[in-house]
Image (spheres, rainbow, N blue to C red):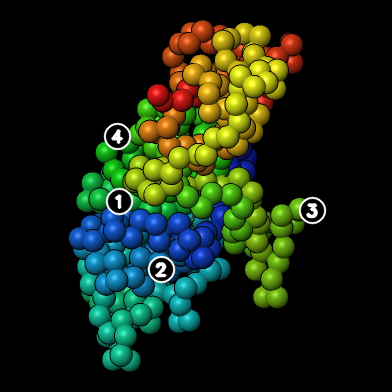
Amino acid sequence: MAKNKALNDAAKAKQDEFYTELRDIEDELKYYKNYFEGKTVLCNCDDPYESNFFKFFAMRFNFLKLKKLIASCYVRSPIAQTQLSLFEEDKPPQERTPYTAIMIELEDYNGDGAANIADVEWLLKNKKGVVKKLKGDGDFRSEECIELLKQADIVVTNPPFSLFREYVAQLIEYDKKFIILGNQNAITYKEIFPLIMQNKMWLGITNGDKSFKVPKYYEPRATRYWQDETGQKYRSMGNMCWFTNLEHKRRNEEIILYRKYYEDPAQYPKYDNYDAIEVSRVLEIPCDYDGVMGVPITFLDKYNPNQFEILNANDFRTNSNVPEKKHGLIKDKDGTINGKATYARILIRRKK
Ligand SMILES: C[S@@+](CC[C@H](N)C(=O)[O-])C[C@H]1O[C@@H](n2cnc3c(N)ncnc32)[C@H](O)[C@@H]1O
């Protein structure tokens, strides 16, 4: 049993090692620029020597007018200080020890006319107290990492996939603002969906296909995998989502509805087991139907809370915490049409 668990944990930990590309971070974070002035940003699954999240904020420390930038990393990261590097120079001697980097300023230390990544490197290497060893293993749930979390206004990272539920629960518990990268599948987790339903968290803007650097040990696969000319391995995934609780422009854009239910109701079949119509494409949501509609999960990409309310999800196997029988839904049973199960659906209603 213990051996199985260890193998399982090791397999899960491997899935956690996906390193976010700078361009993906830039593409999303440009929409939140105005939130950062005077704020403390925490990247708590991020080795400051390797993480592009840390790099993004460190390079823009002055531009974003940050008060403080904190990064902390995890001892068990299998590539910690061995593979990726933001800097040309050698790494510090604390091989494989978890540590934090805390920046409260960025200046043109090398006098080349600009405060840039070379100055970040100088700061980490030379300024006393910026890089500190952690006492524990750097687990985001550890006491000392929670102390860092308490200091933070906004948490921004790509957390370990296998701990996504706990990661989000902790952000909510400490009432933090956040922009984090995750997998679309997380939407249907029973711990996550209620937060989306209650508008405590929503999707960011640039969701979808993303590629990631992966460690050397990553096993080649037939699809969505490649190596560059240096041998660096990459993996891509088509269903990545940003999750946030910061308002952004997309949330205020209305989906343009042009289909009419009453012109041809047959195109919107009713579920056998509850009173809602099936809308299989987000763009086909009718503009004249006042009742409950089952829509694909991709609806959340365009969700505007002023236009629609989210009532429930029909995938009760994964959403068993969602209130039962609200709006006539049947627990433990997916939506079916003529006895055939539909895909996972989110149940929404137009706001008047
Ligand atoms: C998906 S990777 C992303 C790394 C980095 N944030 C990035 O975007 O490039 C998640 C990282 O979290 C680390 N990690 C795993 N478990 C952790 C934990 N309990 N606490 C903190 N970090 C953890 C992993 O080692 C891995 O480096």
Q: For the residue carrying disc 2, how many other residues have a C-alpha within 10 Å: few (<14), some (14-19), or many (20+)?
A: many
Frontmost residue, 334 versus 268: 268
Residue drawn 59% across the image and 59% down it = 212
**Residue at which label 3 appears:** 222
Q: Which residue is mark 1?
A: 154
2 and 3 marks in contact (CB < 8 Å)? no
Q: CA distance from mark 2 to mark 1?
A: 16 Å
Q: Are marks 2 and 1 in contact (CB under 8 Å)?
A: no
The residue under label 3 is which amino acid type?
Ala
Amino acid type, residue under disc 1 in the picture: Ile
Q: Where, by quadrant of the figure, is residue 318 drawn?
A: top right
| Element under disc 3 | loop
Residue picked out by circle 2: 55
Amino acid, disc 4 = Glu
The spot of residue 92 in percent (x, y) is 40, 74
Q: In the rendered image, is residue 16 in sight?
A: no
